[in-house]
Amino acid sequence: MGVDVSDLRNRSRALHANWWQWRPTVEVIRSLDLFDGERLDQLSDGFGEFTETEARQLAAEIEGRVLSRLQPDERILLDGTVTAVPDDSTFHRVPEEQHRNYSADYDWLIRFVAFCRESAGVYVS
């Protein structure tokens, strides 16, 4: 389960993200303050799109403001903290630790940025 991130013009060109990586990705996007909250809430639920211009802007902003401060072995948790501790697949049940279940790692963000940059817009479903 998760979301498919596809090219607006060629839906067969797509990336798949599980919920564990998609939700922190949306929070990374939210931190850039480029789009309104309602739109980002819909993205968090797995629905939405970006125009080609927005996708290019998003790629540039993630690359410049997020990836530039992230190392290849690091990941961003749902609460925005960065860690180099590998995901050991532990399911954290305590509410204060549940943010640790979700992370967007460097490699995923690199793929997402490249997809946004090369697409004719992005559709999330």
Image (cartoon, rainbow, N blue to C red):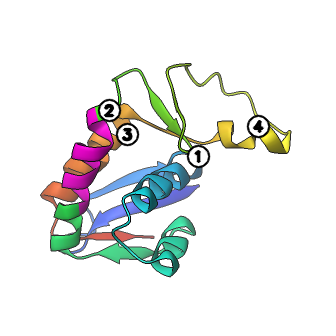
Q: Amino acid at mark 3?
A: Trp
Q: Which residues are magenta?
A: 58-68
The answer to whether marks 1 and 3 mark residues whose Cβ atoms lie closer than 8 Å is no
Q: Residues within 10 Å of mark 4 (few under 14, many from 20)?
A: few
Q: Which mark is residue 69?
A: 2
Q: Which residue is mark 4?
A: 97
Work out how far the residue at label 2 is from the one at label 4, CA to CA, in angstroms: 24 Å
In this view, the mark in front (2 or 3)? 2
Q: Which residue is mark 3?
A: 108
Q: Amino acid at mark 1?
A: Leu
Q: Which mark is residue 96?
A: none
Total count of labels = 4
Q: Residues within 10 Å of mark 3 (few under 14, many from 20)?
A: some
Q: Earlier in the sequence, mark 2 or mark 3?
A: 2
Q: Residues within 10 Å of mark 1 (few under 14, many from 20)?
A: many
Q: Dot 4: what SS?
A: helix
